Image (cartoon, rainbow, N blue to C red):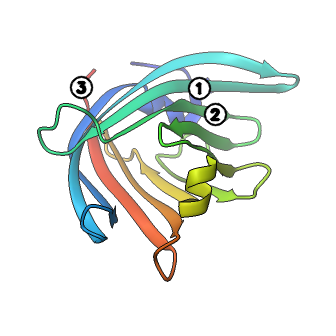
Amino acid sequence: MDLGPEFGPLAALAGTWEGDQGVDVAFLHSKGEIGETPYRERAAFNPFGPVDNGSQTLYGLDYRMSAWRGDEENPFHTEIGYWLWDGADGQVTRGFMVPRGSTILAGGPALADDTTFTLQAEVGSETYGILSNPYLARTARTTLYQVVIDLSTEGTFAYRQITTIDHGHLDEPLEHTDTNTLYRVD
């Protein structure tokens, strides 16, 4: 899908992507320990815009993502949200919600032709921040979210994300990581 320059670095994400080499490193409640879970993933990004906020103009992609362990029929993780490009301020923003009751608005600087960029959010921030439902805020509070996006190889979308979580039963915060490389299928 060819998008114009108004989509900046997000133009390369438009379309549908799949990858089956995902690795999730997290606390496994069923085992009471930190472990690795391989996963497969599908993400679809659909362009929209312009969106005008006074003098600000945004172009973006709405997206849906699902991830499955092995051959499971039901995904263990899903996301819905938006990726936004603010060309005048050189900012990429990713806003998404997961059905566990967390919402993240992450962002960071980028140039229009960047093929790699980093987004971040911190709990308590008034710009790029993290919100959780009351249960998660007590038992598994996300305090920091970072993701590095790599679109430098044509036809691939790779990422490494770190979600720092304060689990009530662990002595120190856990860096929950997810990595995958997806390939364009549409």
Residue 36's x, y, as percent? 24, 64
Considering only vertical position in the picture, is 158 above or below 166? above
Of the pair 78 and 160, the residue shown nearer to us: 78
Asked whether residue 112 is in view, the answer is no
- Circle 2 sits in a helix, a strand or a loop, which is it? strand
Name the image quarter holding residue 179: bottom left
Q: Specify the label residue 85 is tagged with.
A: 2
- Circle 1 sits in a helix, a strand or a loop, which is it? strand
Instruction: Name the kind of residue labelled 1 in the image.
Output: Gly
Instruction: Name the kind of residue labelled 3 in the image.
Output: Val
Q: Distance between the residues labelled 3 and 2?
A: 23 Å
Of the pair 154 and 21, the residue shown nearer to us: 21
Q: Name the residue under label 1.
A: 60
**Local crowd size for mark 1, using a 10 Å CA cut-off: few (<14), some (14–19), many (≥20):** many
CB atoms at circles 3 and 2 under 8 Å apart?
A: no
**Local crowd size for mark 3, using a 10 Å CA cut-off: few (<14), some (14–19), many (≥20):** few
Of the pair 105 and 88, the residue shown nearer to us: 105
Q: Name the residue under label 3.
A: 185
On screen, residue 29 versus residue 55, left or right, reads left
Comes first in the chain, label 1 or label 3: 1
Residue drawn at x 33%, y 34% is: 66
Asked whether residue 84 is in view, the answer is yes
Name the image quarter holding residue 175: bottom left
Residue 173's x, y, as percent? 51, 74
Comes first in the chain, label 1 or label 2: 1
On screen, residue 123 versus residue 97, left or right, reads right
Residue drawn at x 59%, y 26% is: 60
Comes first in the chain, label 3 or label 2: 2
